[in-house]
Amino acid sequence: YYITNNLRKQFELLMAAVVEPAGNNNTEEAVSEEGGEGTPSISDIIRYGAPPEYIPLLVLSFIICVFIIVLFVRAVNEHRRFFTKHTMQGLCTLGIVLTFPVYAIMYYSGIIVPRAMAKVTFLAETYEAISLVFFLRLLFTYMGGKKQTIGKLKGHMVPLANPPLCCLICLPHIKFGKKFMLVHELFILQLFIFQLILGYIDLLIGIDDSHTHPASLIEETYSHYFHGFILLSLLLAIYGLGGIYHAAEEQLKHYQIFRKFILYKAFVTVVKVEELLVTQLAMKVIDSLELDIGVGAIPGELRVHMLCYFLVIVQAAVIFPFLLRAYSTADYPVTPPALLVDSCTDLPMLEFKGDQPLPAVSDYVSFPAAQTLEGPQSGGSEEEETTEITVLAQC
């Protein structure tokens, strides 16, 4: 944090030297007054006051965050029993689901400490880029692994007209192979790399948490370039994921991949739209009406951002239960050795046709032991319920 602040101050001095005419003595004074911090700290809020909705927002956001965390802990407990045999699938599933608690906690921290808004947004967006890698690995686990995926799909013709280029139906079809898989994997991994690097540079410049004074023209230009490049990187990652999914669509149709992706990605998309469009539109309306909605230590623009952060937390709480239903434990592969029944009364009825001999039930029916079996009386240990009893009865 110390290094970040000092680098930001140096950048502001450099920008001021470029923009302001030479010999202006007010540059250093302006930077020292801002101190690299455009938003109030907690002590400033306590000293100068806050809007009337500040405390209710904190209380309601805390309750909603607790609700989301409880649901996540419950999901972890449900998936934990499958970790022994399907560790990678469980970790990828929980890694995707964790996106919602991360957003809720980070944005709640931004409401508590307005000065940290830019930092918590950077952390949430960086984890969202990592979760897209989890989604790719989850597709591999559904297919049995990466090598099995390449083996099953090798030679399949895959269209290049994938979202967001789905309208370009003139694009050709190509064969699925190792090169196709490698290129599309790089499309997905580059999002995390660029989000981490460009997001951190944007954080160093200190553009996003400067709510009390207008940013310079150079700062705004850099900000637009960074955000635009990250958006292009996101679209490229979605294209890479769409290409792999279309290649394996036939094998993955019973996993409802589209539903899983929409529930997970729609929330993140709505968050970005709210931050870029809704907040800017609200501020333009307020400026056009010449309203001063700042209260105490909270300026007007920061007040709008706080309401937007609260809205994100509410949306996370609404969508999260549906997301958990989509990523349920029913996706784990279950391959029982035979038809499992609880008792002989659950056996299916066998039809008798002519002189055909009826098959023995033991040929295809078995069920887990319902009671503990005693071992030999010569001091042997008792066998647990894992012992499988084969039905030896015939009709």
Image (cartoon, rainbow, N blue to C red):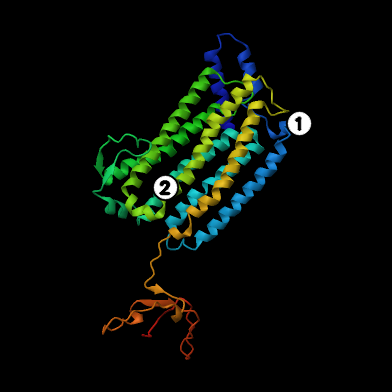
Q: Amino acid at mark 1?
A: Arg
Rendering coords of residue 119 (x, y %): 57, 35
Rendering coords of residue 101 (x, y %): 56, 47
Q: Which mark is residue 229?
A: none
229 to the left or right of 20: left
Q: Residue furthest bottom?
A: 378
Q: Amino acid at mark 2?
A: Phe
- Where the N terminus falls, by quadrant? top right
Looking at the image, tell me whether mark 1 or mark 2 is earlier in sequence order.
1
What residue appears at the point 59 percent right and 50 percent down from the top-left corner? Answer: 68
- Where the C terminus falls, by quadrant? bottom left
39 and 241: which one is in front?
Answer: 241
Badge 1: few (under 14), some or many (20 or more) residues near its Cα, within 10 Å? few
Rendering coords of residue 303 (x, y %): 66, 30
What residue appears at the point 42 percent right and 63 percent down from the top-left corner? Answer: 85
296 to the left or right of 165: right
17 to the left or right of 39: left
Q: Which mark is residue 258?
A: 2
Query: Is label 1 or label 2 in front?
Result: 2
Which quadrant of the structure image shows residue 367? bottom left
Q: Secondary structure at mark 2?
A: helix
Q: Secondary structure at mark 1?
A: helix
| 34 lies above or below 151 | above
226 and 242: which one is in front?
Answer: 242
395 and 153: which one is in front?
Answer: 395
Mark 1–mark 2 distance (CA, rounded to whole Å)? 50 Å
| 12 lies above or below 311 | above
266 and 224: which one is in front?
Answer: 266
Q: Residue furthest front?
A: 354
Task: Return the residue at label 1.
Answer: 47
Q: Are marks 1 and 2 in contact (CB under 8 Å)?
A: no
Rendering coords of residue 268 (x, y %): 50, 40
